[in-house]
Amino acid sequence: MLVNPIKRDSRYTIQKEWTGKDKPQFVLRFCDEWICSSSFYSSVLIRAIGHNAERQGALTFVEGK
C-alpha cells in the first residue's frame, strides 16, 4: 500500500481512517482535503489517478439524464 499514490505529487495521500463505518476505510486526500473513501485500496487509488488527470486538464465524461 502506497501512502503517496501519485509518484510525482506528494500532495496526494491514502491512509486508513475511521469514517463512521464499522471498520476504518482508505481515505484519499489532496492537500489534506478529503476526496473520497472506500473499503478497497484499489478504488481509492483509481480515484487518485482520475483526480490527478482532471487537475491536469483531461477530458471528463459526466452522465447525462
Image (tube, rainbow, N blue to C red):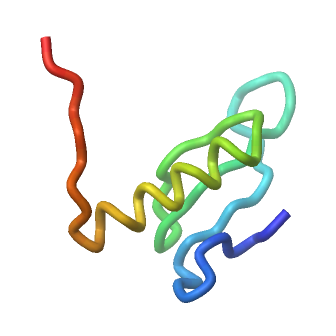
- The residue that appears at 72% across and 46% down in the rendered structure is 42
Would residue 15 appear left or right of 62 to someone viewing this image? right
Residue 20: name its quadrant.
Answer: top right
Lateral position of residue 60 relative to residue 44, left or right: left
Residue beneath the point at 15% across and 19% down: 64
Kindly give the residue lying farthest to the bottom in the view shown. 8
Residue 60 pos. (x, y %): 24, 48
Q: Residue furthest left?
A: 65
Expressed as whole percent of the image width and height from the top left, the position of residue 28 reads 59, 55
- The number of callouts visible is 0
Of the 4 image quadrants, the one containing the N terminus is bottom right
Quadrant for residue 59, please give it: bottom left
Q: Is residue 39 above or below residue 22?
A: below
Q: Position of residue 10 (x, y in %)?
A: 59, 84
Q: Is residue 56 above or below residue 60?
A: below
Residue at image position (28%, 73%) is: 56
In the rendered image, residue 46, in percent from the top left (x then y), is placed at 58, 51
Q: Which residue appears at 79% of the width and 51% of the height?
A: 16
Residue 22 to residue 37: above or below = above
Query: On the rendered image, what quadrant is the C terminus found in?
Result: top left
